[in-house]
Amino acid sequence: MIDTQAAPAERVTSPWGRRFRGALSGLLAASVSLGVAELLAGLVGPNSSPVLVVGGAFIDATPRP
C-alpha cells in the first residue's frame, strides 16, 4: 500500500497582517503593564502613579510662555 499525502498549502501572509498583529501585541503589552503599574501605585500611594509622574515631568519640561 502506498500512502500519499497532499502537500500542505502554502500560506500567503501579507506584511500588513504581520505589522497589524505586531502593533496590536505591542499595544496590548503596554496597556497590561500600565494597568499593573497603576495597581501597584494604588497599593503604595497615589503619588507614585506612573501616569502622574510622567505627566508631571512633561509639564515641567514644557517651556513657559
Image (cartoon, rainbow, N blue to C red):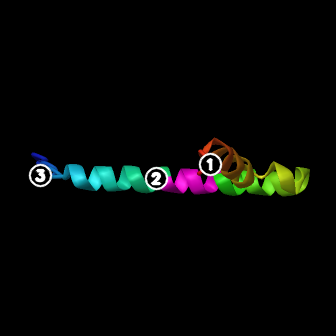
Of marks 1 and 2, which one's residue comes earlier in the chain? 2
* Sequence-wise first label, 3 or 2: 3
Residue position marked by numbered label 2 in the rendering: 25
Instruction: Verify CB contact (< 8 Å) between mark 3 and mark 1.
Output: no
Residue 61 x, y percent position in the rendering = 63, 42
- In primary-sequence order, the first of circles 3 and 1 is 3
Q: Secondary structure at mark 3?
A: loop
Which quadrant holds residue 35?
A: bottom right
* Circle 3 or circle 2, nearest the eye: 2
Mark 2 and mark 1 in contact (Cβ < 8 Å)? Answer: no
Q: CA distance from mark 3 to mark 2?
A: 34 Å
Q: Which portion, as a residue range, is magenta?
A: 27-33
The tally of labels here is: 3
**Quick one: 9 or 60, which is closer to the camera?**
60
Residue mark closest to the camera, 1 vs 2: 1
Task: Report the Cα–Cα distance between label 3 and label 1.
Answer: 70 Å
Depth check: 31 or 48 in front?
A: 48
Q: For the residue labelled by badge 2, is the local secondary structure a helix, a strand or a loop?
A: helix
Q: Disc 1 residue type? A: Arg
Q: Position of residue 39 (x, y in %)?
A: 79, 57
Residue depicted at 38% across the width and 49% down the height = 22
The residue carrying mark 3 is 6
- Label 3 crowding class (10 Å Cα cut-off): few <14, some 14-19, many 20+? few
> Which residue is found at the position 62% from the left and 48% from the top?
64
| Residue 36 picture location, percent across and down | 72, 53
Mark 3 residue type: Ala
Callout 2 amino acid: Ser
Q: Is residue 61 left or right of residue 2?
A: right
Magenta segment includes 30: yes
The residue tagged 1 is: 64
